[in-house]
Image: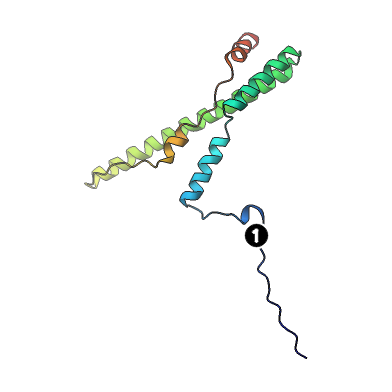
Amino acid sequence: ERRKKKKKKKPRKKGSAARRTKPGSEEELKELVTALGHGCPDEHYVAVISETITFLLQSDKLSMATLLFESYKELSEAVAQSQSARLARDKEEKEEREKRERKEGRIGDFVEHPCEKDINAIICKPLQGCVQSTFSFLL
């Protein structure tokens, strides 16, 4: 008696591997821009952080309030520093490319990818004014 051969099932990828996008694709770029944008708190979360700091101050938890304030400040400064470094690098690369193209006798228009505007707009929103003024007095 012959045994029937069972068809082997291809192992299915689980988790992030199942929906992996093609490296270097437009889709991957959009996902990265979205991930970068989500790295900074939006208005709602900035308000929650500000209210939490205010609550901690009112509850005599000065050290925790200060820690949260300084952590947010560090995040904000890191994002700003990263943005300015990237913009400076982009400007330098653009100038070098234009210089090289002029040398070679080509005059080309610089085309900016549409997602550049989204990336340039990524900033950490400032904490509420009352929180900032409280810490300018305390620190």
The residue lying furthest to the top in this view is 137
Residue neighbourhood size for the residue with mark 1, other residues' Cα within 10 Å, grouped as few (<14), some (14–19), many (≥20): few
Q: Position of residue 40 (x, y in %)?
A: 57, 31
Residue topped by disc 1 = 13
Dividing the picture into quarters, in which one does residue 97 lie?
top left
101 with respect to 88 (left or right)? left
Q: Nearer the viewer, residue 30 or 89?
A: 30
The residue lying furthest to the left in this view is 105
Q: Position of residue 48 (x, y in %)?
A: 65, 23
136 with respect to 110 (left or right)? right
Dividing the picture into quarters, in which one does residue 107 lie?
top left
Q: Is residue 1 above or below residue 137?
A: below
- Quadrant occupied by the C terminus: top right
Q: Describe the element under mark 1 as helix, strand or loop.
A: loop
Q: Nearer the viewer, residue 12 or 82?
A: 12
At 57% from the left and 29% from the top, the residue drawn is: 42
Task: Identify which amino acid the numbered label 1 is placed on.
Answer: Lys
Q: Position of residue 101 (x, y in %)?
A: 27, 45
- Quadrant occupied by the N terminus: bottom right
At 70% from the left and 18% from the top, the residue drawn is: 65
Q: Nearer the viewer, residue 49 or 137?
A: 49
The residue lying furthest to the bottom in this view is 1
The residue lying furthest to the right in this view is 1
